[in-house]
Image (cartoon, rainbow, N blue to C red):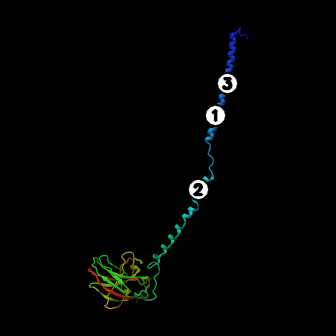
Amino acid sequence: MDRGRFPGLYCVAIWRDVRRLLKGFVAMKNAICLWGLVSGFTLAFAACSSSTAAPPAQPASGGSAGSGTAGSGTAGSTGGTGTAGTGTAGTGTAGTGTAGTGTGGGAACVAPSAPLITDFSGTGGLVSGMPYTGGDPGGTVAPTAVTTSGSLVMTFGGGATTTMFPYAFVGMGLNSCTDASAYTGVTFTASGTLSAGCTIQFSVIDKEHATSGGTCTTGCYPGGTIFTPAATATPVTLPFAGQPAGGTDVAGAAPVDPTQILSIQWQVNPPAAGCTGTITVDDVKFE
């Protein structure tokens, strides 16, 4: 085209070429942008996918720590059924000791091989322990009891009392529950004097009239047979059948059950002003 003769048409042609170039550039630019967007989305998607993936599995040792040997192993089961559960404390001495089978317990009463109960010599007989003493809580003084002379010497020291039925006693427990049903009573020698108004009695104590080693629980005391001591040693014989009834909550109990004797006892019954004197006893036997 002749630019000199047709200058306007030439400019139009140039502008048309420029526009084609510009359109090509825009298309290329759009393609680049589209490629960038696609690439960026792919990278972003990959990043997001990796951030939500499950973490790798933990080592097996992690699970063992939660439920392994330390939680339920030998140490746990051994402690649960060990010595403390079935050992000495559960079936030991406390369960079958003296309290269960000792004097007056579940053991059968034994017949004596000889009639001697005690002669206070310290050898032979059915008594090896020392005498026990006591008095009412209203003021009666408990007596003294001495056996060093080979006899039982009981000294009563008086003491005014406010108790309605005052008493002071000396007793001796047998070595074990005794079946004296082969005999009819007890005999001993006695001597001495007591002040005016005092009486003395002797008691055979069986299981049905005793709480310690016996079967009685409330209101328990033996009856007593009153005797009068002489100035010199004189035999005194007191039959089981002659002993008055005492106190017991055992239904149908006899005054004395000679098949289950636990102890013997001497008791003074003082007036309100008290009782003084000395009584000596020796050679106590079943008769």
| Residue type at tag 1 | Phe
The quadrant of the picture occupied by the N terminus is top right
Residue 135 pos. (x, y %): 33, 79
What x and y, as percent, mark residue 236?
Answer: 35, 90
What amino acid type is highlighted by mark number 2? Ser
**Viewer can see residue 10:** yes
> What quarter of the picture does the C terminus occupy?
bottom left
Check the image and report above or below for 115 versus 95: below
Give the residue at mark 2: 67
Q: Quadrant of residue 221?
A: bottom left
Please tell me which residue is depicted at 34% across the width and 84% down the height of the picture. 154
**Residue at the far front in the pictured view:** 148
Query: Residue 213: where, in percent of width, then height?
Result: 42, 78
Secondary structure at badge 1 equals: helix
Q: Residue at x 69, y 10 (%)?
A: 7
- Determine the CA span between mark 1 and mark 3: 21 Å
Place of residue 23 in the rendered image (x, y in percent of width and height, measured from the top left): 67, 21
Q: Amino acid at mark 3?
A: Ala
242 w.r.t. 42: above or below: below
For this rendering, which residue is in front, 106 or 6?
6
Residue drawn at point x = 63 percent, y = 37 percent:
45
Task: Report the residue marked by disc 1.
Answer: 41
Q: Nearer the viewer, residue 140 or 96?
A: 140
Q: Which residue is mark 3?
A: 27
Give the spatial CA distance, label 3 vs label 2. Answer: 66 Å
Q: Nearer the viewer, residue 24 or 244?
A: 24
Q: How many marks?
A: 3
